[in-house]
Image (spheres, rainbow, N blue to C red):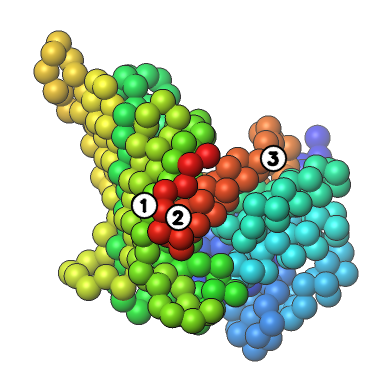
Amino acid sequence: MASTPPLRIAVVGAGAISQIAHLPLLSKARGATLVALCDNDGPKARALADRFGVRDVFTDIDDLFDFDQVDAVVIATPNHLHEPHVLAAIRAGVDVLCERPLSLTSRGVERIVATAQNAGRKVVVGNNHRFRTDVQQLQRFMRGGELGAITGIRGGHYQFRGQQGGWRYRRAEAGGGAFLELGYPLIDLALWLTDFSEAVRVSAQFDRGRGASAVEDSMAMQIELGGGLLFTADVAWNYVGEEDRWWFETRASRGSARLAPLRVVKLLNGRPTDVSPTGAAARESAFIQSYRAELAHFIALVRDEIPYKPPSDQLVVQKLVEAVYKSAEEGREIRS
């Protein structure tokens, strides 16, 4: 029996996430071959291509798709380019993994989902936290009902001052600041773990500079989901402290859990008992492990080895993101 040829993948965008995750992981991925890199900075793209053994380099995405040697593409460009680049890939008959957000607007997400469905193409959004080993274990506890009804979720991410820059500080290109970069994945994770409960009300406050191009440096939010479930989050990328901080905790009627590392406590015979999973220490960071699993999942989807589900859930996330910004900008609570 003839073996299935490897999936031919191109990466569009040669920024930090491509250099740290996509290029090194795809260059060694099973079932796929990294065939091209596209970025408007030609010399930079060529240097990275040589480093990771990529033969072809392009500075224009249309030229990449005219190349006609690509089965799937990873979109890792600035946020405002995600929607047009994803739509270009769909029109070229190519399946897509796009870094979050899929679009800067809910209408844009709707356009992409509808266009992909009409064209018979697969679109996946890079919500890498879903693929973390500890998150997968937490999901089993939560969806298996072992902790009882979930009553609250608290998350946050404080990042050192100066780690972000360039286009991420320009609202027209980024769409937002600390919240979109650090808060979006927390919202997606909370909704995903609770089967996308509908938001009832949203209250948020941010710290944003003046001017049309300014983005927020921090955001604090409280979101009431269906059934009285309360999700609170706090993010900032101008943090001054000893180390970056990331946290995610859940409260339930018969227990609680927190991540990084995963700790689970539940009532057994009326007593709080630590039931945290045990196992060998991870050989790589949760960040790299999550991207490795995400890319393997994408390759399997495109090769029809596992079922595909359109990213309609990202419309729910994007609408909630828009409600958070509206609440912060208008200084009032938003109700659905």
User: Residue 273, can we see it?
Assistant: yes
Tag 1: amino acid: Met
Relative horizontal placement of residue 59, taking residue 131 as reference (left or right): right
Q: Identify the residue shown where x is 23% and y is 36%.
A: 263
Q: Nearer the viewer, residue 27 or 114?
A: 114
Relative horizontal placement of residue 51, taking residue 163 as reference (left or right): right
Tag 3: amino acid: Pro
Q: Identify the residue shown where x is 58% and y is 57%.
A: 101
Q: Quadrant of residue 138?
A: top left
Report crowding for label 3: few under 14, some 14 to 19, many 20 or more residues within 10 A (C-alpha): some
Report crowding for label 1: few under 14, some 14 to 19, many 20 or more residues within 10 A (C-alpha): many
Disc with the residue nearer the chain's start (2 vs 1) = 1
Q: Residue 259: x, y in percent?
A: 29, 43
Q: Is residue 233 above or below residue 47?
A: above
How far apart are the alpha carbons under marks 2 and 3? 29 Å
User: Residue 291, can we see it?
Assistant: no
Do residues under tags 2 and 1 come within 8 Å of each other at their CB atoms? yes
Label disc, if present, on residue 327 of the rendered structure: 2
Q: Nearer the viewer, residue 3 or 183?
A: 183
Q: Residue furthest bottom?
A: 43
Label disc, if present, on residue 310 of the rendered structure: 3
Q: Is residue 199 above or below residue 291?
A: above
Question: What residue is shown with label 1?
Answer: 221
Q: Residue 205: x, y in percent?
A: 36, 59
Task: Tell me the SS state at disc 2.
Answer: helix
Tag 2: amino acid: Ser
